[in-house]
């Protein structure tokens, strides 16, 4: 339980959530009819919801041993 009260965990969870928010904003804007015709309130709501889901996922799956680094893009073991 202590691992959730460390700067390392919040750095991991925050980076993961920020990436999720950016992806959601990108998809929301990409699928919209036009930049000024978009309902940015709905898109922001979706982005906030996905950020919370991302933090919840971090809490559920964070190991705290460095093996779940979100910056690690290598494939394989």
Image (tube, rainbow, N blue to C red):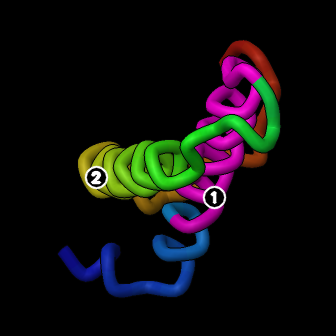
- Does 12 appear above or below 67? below
The quadrant where residue 76 appears = top right
Assess whether residue 51 is covered by the magenta stretch.
no
Q: Tell whether label 1 touches label 2 (CB within 8 Å).
A: no
Disc 2 packing (10 Å; few <14; some 14–19; many ≥20): some
Query: Where in the figure is residue 56, as x and y percent of width and height?
Result: 28, 52
What residue would you read off at disc 1?
Answer: 18
Assess whether residue 24 is covered by the magenta stretch.
yes
Query: Where in the figure is residue 67, as x and y percent of width and height?
Result: 57, 45
Q: Residue furthest top?
A: 76
Q: Which residues are magenta?
A: 14-33
What's the residue at 43%, 56% (across, down)? Answer: 48
Q: Main secondary structure of the magenta part?
A: helix
- Does 20 appear above or below 58? above
Disc marking residue 56: 2
Disc marking residue 45: none
């Amino acid at each position: 339980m202590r691992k959730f009260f460390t700067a390392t965990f919040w750095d991991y969870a925050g980076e993961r959530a920020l990436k999720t928010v950016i992806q959601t904003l990108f998809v929301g804007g990409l699928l919209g009819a036009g930049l000024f015709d978009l309902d940015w309130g709905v898109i922001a709501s979706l982005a906030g919801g996905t950020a919370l889901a991302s933090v919840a996922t971090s809490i559920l799956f964070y190991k705290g041993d460095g093996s779940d680094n979100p910056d690690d893009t290598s494939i394989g073991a």
